[in-house]
Image: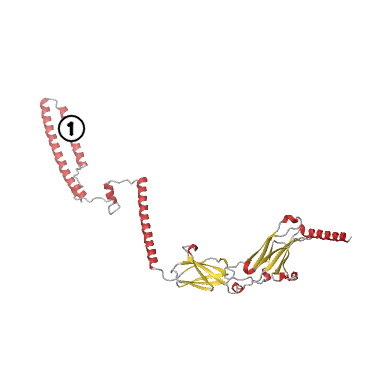
Amino acid sequence: MKALRCFCVCSLLLLKVSAGFGDLRRPENVSVDSLNTRYVLRWDWPHETAANQTVTFTVQCLDEFRSRKASNEKYRTSLCVNDLEHRCDFTGAELSYDICFLLRVRANTSQQSSGWVQIRFCPDEHAALGPPSSLKLSSVKEDLEIIITDPLSSTNQSMKTLLKNKLSYLIQYWRRSEGPQKAKVLETKNNLVMLTELDRQTWYCVRVQSHDDFHNKSSVFSDTHCTRTEGQMPYWQIFLYVLISLLLCLLLVLLYFCFNKMLSLLKSTFCPAVHLPDHIQELWLSESETPQLLAPESPESVCEPLVMVSAELDAVAVDEHSNAGEQDSSTHSRHSSGDSGVYSTEEDSSHRSTTHADLQMSSRKHGVELRDGTLRELCA
């Protein structure tokens, strides 16, 4: 009978255990994202195992040294309770940097809870070290001055203090024209560093990396800062700049002449020039743009004799000629006989020839006088 009772009690206990832990899956891929003293616990959990149920998560922390004690449950600290997200930020827990802890997480529903998933976390070993919080670069004559600020914790405390002065810096610097592949390296524990033996009037770039000497871990590099050194420019660099300037000027002149030559070639090809006759070109090349008459060398080269006969003289001559004709015809009609006709004819002929001769002489004389007067007026 006692054996039967014992069996029933054990069966009930097994049913409770299976109902509490058998159905709900545990979180998976539990890890800690950390930088200096900022800690975030992350995990994955399959949603299909708890359909139509609200699932929350609980995260607890325990000092590894205290976990060895039998009554360690009272030393556990709950970091996140009933959290819906798959993460727990326990930066504000103020864990000691040089002590290891046990972190565990489980899933919860209103009816049951999953088993715990536990990991070991040591901040000084597992937490990533950050780069310097700030970097200032300035030029001091021909040198570069670097001011490095220590990486800070979540409470703005220097990580050098937490690492017990085991923090150093790795400095890389290079000419900006060369790139970080040819960078020079300088290791130092100081926060103020002076880079010497640099070229004058040259751009340099600098980046710094933090290094934990005790645990041998390094941070990523800081942002790159660049500045130019001061000092007088080297003579060879001045000569090089002058030479480049002269070459550029010469190139511009050559381009100008080539452009003009090409333009002239295109103009002669598509718009050929029409040559004007020589006598027109001489007019275009004269000093004055308005046409000018050539001055005569002598009046005779322009003026020529002009014969003019007076209209009155011509009328008198015509009248006399007409009267003579009428008299001749009347005389011829009255004297039909031979003797009288011969006499009249001879008389008329002599009279007509005399009159005609006088007329020509008078006309010639008048023409000469008129010509001399007109010529003088024209040539005056």
Residue 120 appears in view? yes
Taking the spot 17% from the left edge, 32% from the top edge, the residue there is: 327
Residue 75 in which image quadrant: bottom right
The colour scheme used to paint the residues is secondary structure
Q: Is residue 256 above or below residue 354?
A: below
Q: Position of residue 53 (x, y in %)?
A: 76, 57
Q: Position of residue 321 (x, y in %)?
A: 18, 35
What's under tag 1, amino acid-wise? Gly
Residue at the outermost right position: 1
Closer-to-camera residue (31/255)? 31
Residue behind mark 1: 325
Taking the spot 17% from the left edge, 30% from the top edge, the residue there is: 329
Q: Position of residue 50 (x, y in %)?
A: 75, 56
Query: How many numbered badges does the structure rendering display?
Result: 1
Q: Is residue 11 above or below residue 316?
A: below
Position of residue 308 in the picture relative to residue 182 (left or right): left
Taking the spot 38% from the left edge, 61% from the top edge, the residue there is: 244
Q: Secondary structure under badge 1?
A: helix
Taking the spot 85% from the left edge, 59% from the top edge, the residue there is: 7
Closer-to-camera residue (266/350)? 266
